[in-house]
Amino acid sequence: QVSLVESGGGLVQPGGSLRLSCEASGRILSSSGVGWFRQPPGKQREFVAAIRWGSGTTNYAASVKGRFTISREKAKNTVYLQMTSLKPEDTAVYYCAVDNYYTPGYSEEPYDYWGQGTQVTVSS
């Protein structure tokens, strides 16, 4: 069993930066992937980025590639999402999730555990 807690959301101006954190309690397997998803207002949840816990291999949605960076700190059981050059369309509730037997992809279906989410609002 894995519990996830996101933090770091808030209000930021367009062009600004934020770093989200996802702290996990419980063991994350080397085969696991930790992903970030987001749900904009009135829209479906969508994939943002993911990282394989063991190797650190990353995967990004086209809409954030080059602006967002996912990383992990094994000693702290934490995954980060560094977001730069933020746009109003990045406004969403951001969730982290764990897939115990990760293969790169964009669907939320394989993910086994989810956090409660953190709000990110990009507005002037």
Image (cartoon, grey):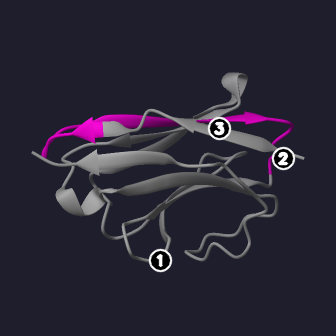
Q: How crowded is mark 2: few (under 14 residues within 10 Å), some or many (20 or more)?
A: some
Q: Which residue is farthest top?
A: 75
Q: Are marks 2 and 1 in contact (CB under 8 Å)?
A: no
- Which residue bears the numbered disc 1? 44
At 41% from the left and 68% from the top, the residue drawn is: 61
Residue placed most toward the observer, 123 or 112: 123
Asked if the residue under mark 3 is in contact with the one under mark 1, i.e. CB atoms within 8 Å, the reply is no
Q: What residue type is labelled 2?
A: Leu
Q: Which residue is drawn at 13% across and 44% down?
A: 15
Instruction: Give the labeled residue for mark 2.
Output: 29
Q: Residues within 10 Å of mark 1 (few under 14, many from 20)?
A: few
Q: Position of residue 103 (x, y in %)?
A: 69, 69
The residue stretch that appears in magenta = 11-30
Label 3: few (<14), some (14–19) or many (≥20) C-alpha neighbours in 10 Å: some
Residue kind at label 3, given as amino acid type: Val
Measure the C-alpha gap from mark 3 to mark 2.
18 Å
Provide the secondary structure element on which disc 2 rests: loop
Give the secondary structure at mark 3.
strand
Mark sitting on residue 5: 3
Residue at the spot x=90%, y=47% of the render?
A: 1
Name which residue type carries label 1.
Answer: Gln
Instruction: Residue 118: give its label.
Output: none
> What residue do we see at 35% from left, 47% from top?
120
